[in-house]
Amino acid sequence: MAVNLSTEIVEASAAQRPVLARLFELYQYDFSEFDGADVDEQGVYGTPHLESYWRDADRHPFLLRAGDAWAGFALVRTGEPTDMAEFFVMRKYRRRGIATAFARDVFARFPGAWQVREIEANRPAQSFWRRAIPVAFDEREWGRGPMQVFVIPAAG
C-alpha cells in the first residue's frame, strides 16, 4: 500500500539519543537475521559506540521522520572516504522510496568520496544500495562482503 508521507531528516541532538538508541535496537533485531546476534541478560542488544556520535566531530547522527513518527536513522563517519556506518528504515516504511530519498539526502550533505559496506549474507541491503547510490560506483570486497565506493559531487 503506497501512502504519500511527508519526511524530514533531523540532525539528532544529544537529547534525541534515547530515540536513536531505541531505533538502534530495532535495527539490531533486523540485522540479527544475518549476524546471529543475541540480546544480553537485560534483553537488549546494546549500543556501545552510539555515544561517540555526540562526542566525536567526525561522526554525524541523523533521524528520519515519516509523517509524525520516527522511521529510521543514519550514522555517518566523515573522512576520506565518508562512511555510511549504519543505516536503518523501519519495515513499514520500506519499498516506498523513503529509504532511497533518505540515503541520497544524507549523501548530498557530505560531498566527496564515500563508501557503503554490506555483509555477504545481507542480500537485501546489497540490492538496496546498488539502487540507492545516485552516481556510478565501483564495487569491491572489504573482507565481509561487498563495498560500493563512489564520489558525490558538490552541489553547484
Image (cartoon, rainbow, N blue to C red):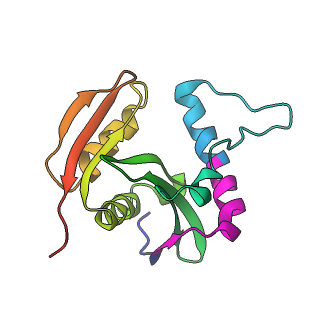
Q: Is residue 19 magenta?
A: yes
Residue 18, image x and y in percent? 72, 60
- What secondary structure is the magenta-colored segment mainly? helix
Residue 65 shown in magenta: no
Relative to 127, 84 lies left or right: right
- Residue placed most toward the observer, 29 or 9: 9
Who's the residue at 77% across and 40% down the image?
Answer: 44
The percent coordinates of residue 143 (x first, y second) are 36, 21
For the N terminus, give its image quadrant: bottom left
Residue 31: image quadrant is top right
Residue 86: x %, y % from top left: 48, 46
Which of 79 and 119 lies nearest the eye of the viewer?
79
Q: Please determine whether, in this image, residue 153 is positioned above or below residue 34.
A: below
**Relative to 75, 54 lies left or right:** right
Q: Residue at x 64, y 27 (%)?
A: 37
* Image quarter in which the C terminus is found: bottom left
Task: Name the residue: 40% across, 23% down.
Answer: 144
In the visual, does 86 lie left or right of 155? right
The answer to whether residue 6 is left or right of residue 141 is right
Q: Which residues are magenta?
A: 8-24
In the image, farthest residue toward the top: 143
Name which residue lies at 61% across and 57% down. Answer: 55
Q: Is residue 125 above or below residue 54?
A: above
Image quadrant in which you'd find residue 41: top right
Q: What number of labels is visible?
A: 0
* Residue sitting farthest toward the right: 42
